[in-house]
Image (tube, rainbow, N blue to C red):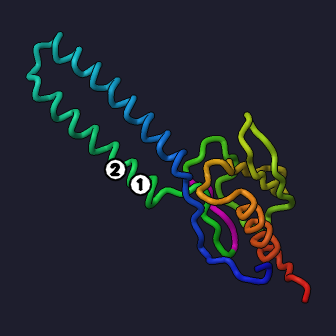
Amino acid sequence: MAGTTLPTPHDYRFAPAFAVRLVGLSLVALALVMFAGTAVVALASINADVLVVLLGVGVGAVFWLGWWLRNRAYVLRAEDDGYVVGPVRGAGVKRARWSEVSQAATTTVHDIDCLVLHLQDGRSTTIPVEALAVDREQFVREMQRRLRAGQGHRPLG
């Protein structure tokens, strides 16, 4: 397994539990919008059909978010020459080449296990491992192999 090549580009997607949390937050936001919309309709004597349209658009947006998180969104896209971080808040550098990475380390940030890629210029990329739909040990091994290959190192033997 150590000598096998990894598929490129490879998207590391959001873990299902993380995606469910985001969809749940969007449902809470929709409920708050509907509450405010109901108050506006009641106070301004607007036709109540506006609420039905608002609810339809909101439910459609929640379903679209769930689909996007499941099928399109990624935490990390690993390519031959580098990586791109998806919509992750506080990740730091969102795009870099493997050859720019000077060190990779695991750490805990706010009680969340993370992989930190330190770049040669002092900047860094922080990837929350718990947000990934992959085993953390497998992810770290794959990142090590990608870093070695990206920096021109070849396995012995």
Numbered circle sitting on residue 68: 1
Is mark 2 in CB contact (under 8 Å) with mark 1? Answer: yes
- Image-quadrant location for residue 156: bottom right
Please name the residue shown 39% across and 29% down the image: 28
Quadrant the C terminus occupies: bottom right
Secondary structure under badge 1?
helix
Q: Residue 38 at what x, y percent from top left? A: 22, 19
Q: Residue 12 at what x, y percent from top left? A: 59, 61
Numbered circle sitting on residue 64: 2
Magenta residue check for 113: no
Quadrant the N terminus occupies: bottom right
- What's under tag 1, amino acid-wise? Trp
Answer above or below: position of 11 versus 34: below
Which contiguous range is marked in magenta? 81-86
Q: Residue 35 at what x, y percent from top left? A: 28, 20
- What's under tag 2, amino acid-wise? Trp
- Image-quadrant location for residue 146: bottom right
Secondary structure under badge 2?
helix
Q: Nearer the viewer, residue 152 or 61?
A: 61
Please name the residue shown 24% across and 22% down the image: 37
Please name the residue shown 67% across and 75% down the image: 80
Would residue 9 appear left or right of 82 to someone viewing this image? left
Q: Residue 10 at what x, y percent from top left? A: 59, 70
Numbered circle sitting on residue 110: none
